[in-house]
Image (cartoon, rainbow, N blue to C red):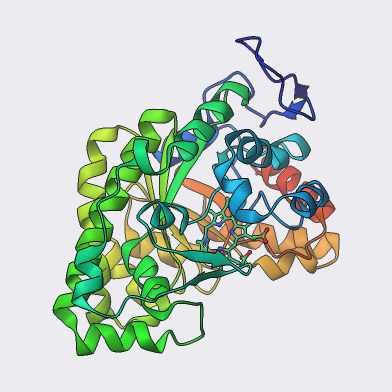
Amino acid sequence: MAARMSASDGAAAVPGGAVATGAAGGEASAFLAACRRQPVRHRPIWIMRQAGRYLPEYRALREKVDFATLTRTPELAAEVTLQPLRRFPLDAAILFSDIMTPLQGMSVELDFEPAPVVREPIRSVAQIEALPALVPARDVPFVLETLRLVRRDLPRGVPLIGFAGAPFTLLCYLVCGRPSKEFAAARTFLYAQPQAAQRLLTHLAEAMAQYLAAQAEAGAQALMLFESWAGLLGRREFERFALPAVRRTAATLRSAGVPLIYYVNDGAALMPTVAALDVDVVGIDWRLDIGEARRILGPEKAVQGNLDPAALFAPSEELRRHADAVLDAAGPAPGHIFNLGHGIWPDTDPEAVARLVDHVHEWESRA
Ligand code: CP3
């Protein structure tokens, strides 16, 4: 059931034309209903990193334009946001950008290689104090413009997710300078300079609150915070450093009136703590059984996840069984959004994604 994109204001159509609608084209969004733990006619699904290198059309564009330019050019960022929606009847779109983009707006110089590399890692109080506040309309206007363009061209019933990095995860990149397995410099910083770390986290929490509030104002219908490096922390350090910062961001966003999703990677041991956080949805990685996560998080939270991205490499019949295992574990209670446990891998076959989306959409009618 493909529907035409609405070019309602008659402006130039986004190249590529038709966008497939989720099974709910023109109807209320299954994704937003699930965020609010309301019953849905089909299980909503979207995929972390759904716009990206596994799509040949993304790679074709990247041959011509570097990543940073893509994120800073609203027409191109909007085009990339819509690319996966043209192929698959996904239930949500996610802004094409990066967690480091707003930091570039705060004068942090970095390169994407393709992972972010910060030229001058932050290690001192003086550097933290020199970090300016983020004024989204001044510092990252292109992100807000991208959201407006995407909203114009998305089919009705498919909402747009805005996002930011969670403060601790941003701290990891800022302090270490580049991704690493242990993020030793970031963890050392927490123990060696706890007050400086708190200060940086508070600053980032406020900046991301401003950033996400501006995204909601520009048209984002749900907001997601990525805590990609939560798994580096023991529960005590998570509670001391990462959590208060997220709480600060989340508190500001309550008045935005859109669902808030907190994705916690490698966070099985942290779930009892996360349960007390005032967010609508908790996203989890594949290591934790999603039924177990729901039991720990309780009936007040929706959950998002959690198929292993590697499962997309299984033969089709087995992929269906792996998806069923997630759906079975999540159970019939409202409040489950199907997703991968982490971002899709660049060498994934788009056909496997097509099969997964259809299979998940048919679940409620099979049950
Ligand atoms: O999900 C989407 O489709 C929206 C776009 C998006 C990107 N990055 C595009 C991107 C989102 C939501 C992100 C978030 C992000 N970025 C996170 C949190 C989610 C997670 O994966 O844990 C993190 C940790 C980053 C930091 C980052 N940026 C890394 C580690 C990398 C390189 C490796 C990778 O996964 O691709 C990037 C670069 C980046 N961000 C690319 C894309 C499509 C690849 C750049 C390229 O085209 O060369």
Q: Give the residue at x 39% y 68%.
A: 169
- Residue, x 61% and y 26% (percent of image)? 154
Residue 94: percent from left, percent from top: 55, 43
Between 343 and 356, the one lying in front of the other is: 343
Q: Vertically, is 125 above or below 129?
A: below
| Horizontal arrangement in the rendering, residue 11 relative to residue 159 (left or right) | right
The outermost residue toward the left is 195
Indicate whether 280 appears above or below 15.
Answer: below
Q: Nearer the viewer, residue 144 or 344?
A: 144
Visible residue check, residue 324: yes
Residue 81, image x, y percentages = 63, 40
Residue drawn at the location 72% of the way across and 40% of the way down: 83
Q: Identify the image quadrant of the C terminus.
A: top right
Count of labels shown?
0
Residue 241's spot in the image, x, y percent?
23, 73
Image location (x, y in percent) of residue 219:
44, 29
- The quadrant in which the N terminus is found is top right
Residue 244 visible in the shown view:
no
Is residue 143 shown above or below 157? below
62 with respect to 225 (left or right): right
